[in-house]
Amino acid sequence: MANRLSDARAALKTTLQALGYIVYSAPVETMTPPCLILVPASPYASIVTIGATPKMILSFQVTLCVAANDNQAALTNLDAMIQSVSENLPTGIRVGDFTQPKIAQVGPNDLLTTDIQFDVTI
């Protein structure tokens, strides 16, 4: 079962990287924007059916980050990133709502961020 979970997470990371963004598997001390942070959400795994190969739903929180050097430019860049991610996800991923943009300081960088939850059925 652990391989299926790891494989699903790796496939989602690969999909997001194919859009041209750096994708981090966890928040790190210094991030290079624009980037995405892909971490398990809560609940991480929900079992839908039981058996030898249970059907599961995995939930991930994805944080989209852009440089917050200029408010208007940062919001425009975040809007473009939201659109790019939304339009290029493979079928079968349930997408939640994007949170209100907020400023986060990561290391020396100020980032404008928004979070979204993806649910993947495996």
Image (cartoon, rainbow, N blue to C red):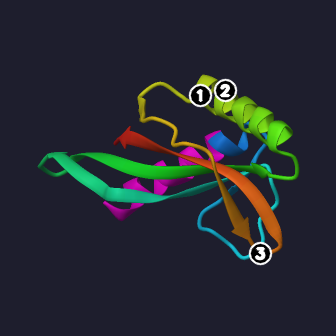
Please name the predominant secondary structure of the magenta segment in the image.
helix
Measuring 82% from the left and 37% from the top, which residue is drawn there? 72
Residue indicated by mark 2: 83
Amino acid beneath label 2: Gln
Segment colored magenta: 1-15
Given residues 70 and 11, the one toward you in this image is 70
x then y, percent, for residue 5: 39, 56
x then y, percent, for residue 33: 80, 54
* Mark positioned earlier in the residue sequence (2 or 3): 2
Given residues 89 and 54, the one toward you in this image is 89
Residue 86, numbered label? 1
Amino acid beneath label 3: Gly
Amino acid beneath label 1: Ser
Mark whose residue sits in front, 1 or 3: 3
Identify the secondary structure beneath mark 2: helix
Asked if residue 71 is positioned above or below residue 104 in the image, the reply reads: above
Residue 107, numbered label? 3
Residue 17 shown in magenta: no
Tell me if residue 54 can be seen: no
- Gap in angstroms between the C-alphas marked 1 and 3: 28 Å
